[in-house]
Image: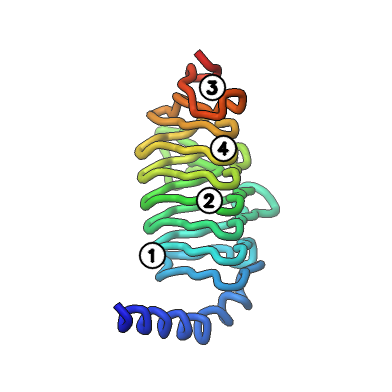
């Protein structure tokens, strides 16, 4: 156990000695003690801001590329934990607030390919800009979740394999394809209660 702790400490020291200075130069902003573990791809470094104490898991793809507008912006708030194999692609604006937790294989995007023409391969057609994406402070995103052009409030839980295409307010549990609210925190009773799909208490 002691040996493992020493090895991990040495890895952390090596990371900051070699990787952090490079990331400090290329990112728009990166806070202290943030780590990106073996990224699959990073596009638009100059448009990506990462807070302090952020951990981004292995083989994740981060992008902030202005394909649809003049500017693009991706922000990941301090204390957030991004899982392995996450794909986060902003063509305009994606804001992940502080202390957000995502599981593995999460997809977050503010855009999608059009498919208007049946004579042109879809990957050659225009990219359509959707609404800005925001994920509120303290929210937990389950495994295999897709978040596409929506806002999610703070301290929410999005169940595994959900596809979120509508905004989710604060303090909600949402699951399914498309994701629907099933619970919400009731401040009056200080507990989580079942709701209808609109987040209204039964």
The answer to whether marks 3 and 2 mark residues whose Cβ atoms lie closer than 8 Å is no
Query: What residue would you read off at disc 1?
Result: 58
- Asked whether the viewer can see residue 116, the reply is no
The foreground one among 181 and 29 is 181
Query: What residue would you read off at disc 3?
Result: 199
Residue 126, which numbered label? Answer: none
Coloring basis for residues: rainbow
The answer to whether marks 4 and 2 mark residues whose Cβ atoms lie closer than 8 Å is no
Query: What residue would you read off at disc 2?
Result: 100
**In the displayed structure, does residue 8 sit left or right of residue 113?**
left
- Assign a secondary structure to mark 1: loop
Mark nearer the N terminus (4 vs 1) = 1
Q: Residues within 10 Å of mark 2 (few under 14, many from 20)?
A: many
Distance from the alpha carbon under mark 4 to that under mark 3: 13 Å
Picture layout, residue 25 above or below residue 40: below
Distance from the alpha carbon under mark 1 to that under mark 3: 35 Å
Picture layout, residue 202 above or below residue 35: above
């Amino acid at each position: 156990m002691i040996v493992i702790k020493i090895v991990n400490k040495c890895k952390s020291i090596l990371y900051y000695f070699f990787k952090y200075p490079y990331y400090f130069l290329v990112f728009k902003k990166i806070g202290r003690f943030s780590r990106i573990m073996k990224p699959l791809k990073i596009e638009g470094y100059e448009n990506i801001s990462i807070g302090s104490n952020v951990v981004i898991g292995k083989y994740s793809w981060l992008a902030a590329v202005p394909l649809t507008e003049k500017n693009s912006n991706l922000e990941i708030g301090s204390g957030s934990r991004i899982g392995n194999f996450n794909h986060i692609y902003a063509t305009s604006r994606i804001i992940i607030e502080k202390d957000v937790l995502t599981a593995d294989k999460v997809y977050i995007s503010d855009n999608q390919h059009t498919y208007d023409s049946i004579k042109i391969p879809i990957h050659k057609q225009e990219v359509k800009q959707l609404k800005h994406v925001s994920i509120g402070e303290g929210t937990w995103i389950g495994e295999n979740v897709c978040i596409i052009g929506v806002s999610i409030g703070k301290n929410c839980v999005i169940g595994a394999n959900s596809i979120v295409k509508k905004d989710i307010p604060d303090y909600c549990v949402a699951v399914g394809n498309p994701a629907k609210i099933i619970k919400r925190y009731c401040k009056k009773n200080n507990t989580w209660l079942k709701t209808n799909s609109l987040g209204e208490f039964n």
